[in-house]
Amino acid sequence: MNVEKYLDQEGCIDRTTEEIDEFIRTKGSQELFNTLHIVRSGQWNEGHTYNFFSQTIDGVSIFDHQKGRSRLGIEWLFGKLSNIVECLNPQRILDIGCGTGLESVFLAKSFPNINVVGIDRIKEMISVAETRKRKYSLNNVNFLVGDAYNLPVEKESFDLALFMNVLEVLDDYGSFDRRIQQSYNALRPGGAAIVKFALSGEENLEYHVDETSIYLRNSGFQAIGNDSFRFRNIDGRDFSYVIISGEKI
Ligand SMILES: C[S@@+](CC[C@H](N)C(=O)[O-])C[C@H]1O[C@@H](n2cnc3c(N)ncnc32)[C@H](O)[C@@H]1O
């Protein structure tokens, strides 16, 4: 499916912080969430679970947590994901920490012959993802409430695993190696893992790429590659999206 068309259908449009704050003031954050799916997830980790639909997380607007929400970045990411899927031709994709299912549903809609499983620990996330799935009447994507550290999936049953803005937010009771290891077990030999980060302009992109590449290598992945896209979002702030991929030996 065409990336722009999908994002249009999702109501994925750029809004400035001021516009979003005004929307919340007048209509409430739940309404915003329902209408503008630029809010990909308002949830980071356990500490914030119950603030999911509230306006702030620790006093910060949930949208300030959504760095890089600019449509430009999402278009780049989805274009890349489409290219990767066309190239690897996976049959089954596992989206770990799928949040509200934006990527899972996009891939299921774009590639009807592929089966996608999205897993997130927060049931409210999964319920939004289910709504998104129903919107497109898809039967090749399934969402499960589950923990990334104890994935409710069979060993070696996937060809591609995604960590979309997830690796950095999984609870700190595991090292990065341990986090990546979860996907390693779920992947068949020769399967691939894709890690995506969103970095602000000040953050050191090379450092994150190098570090994640080491973790992938330590976890038994090879042929590590990366790509990134730097853009100025609608608020005038610089962001980079970076994806790092590796193949399971
Ligand atoms: C920043 S969001 C990213 C959501 C989605 N992948 C996206 O790109 O829009 C991180 C997600 O990871 C989920 N998460 C955090 N720890 C988790 C865990 N241990 N197991 C499963 N999901 C987890 C959160 O609930 C949240 O939905």
Image: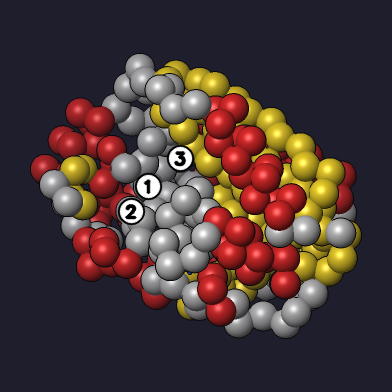
**Residue 82, position in %: x, y?**
74, 43
Numbered mark located on residue 12 in the image: 3
Which secondary structure, mark 3? loop
Front label number (1 vs 2) = 2
Residue occupied by mark 1: 39
Q: How far apart, in angstroms, are the residues tagged by discs 2 and 3?
A: 15 Å
Q: Is mark 3 within 8 Å of ligand 1?
A: no
Which secondary structure, mark 1? loop
Of the numbered discs 3 and 1, the one sitting upstream in the chain is 3
Numbered mark located on residue 26 in the image: none
Q: How far apart, in angstroms, are the residues tagged by discs 3 and 1?
A: 9 Å
Of the numbered discs 2 and 3, the one sitting upstream in the chain is 3
Tags 1 and 2 in contact by the CB under 8 Å rule? yes
Answer above or below: position of 236 versus 241: above
- Identified at 46% across, 33% down, the residue is 199
What residue type is disc 2 on?
A: Gly
Front label number (2 vs 3) = 2
What residue type is disc 3 on?
A: Cys
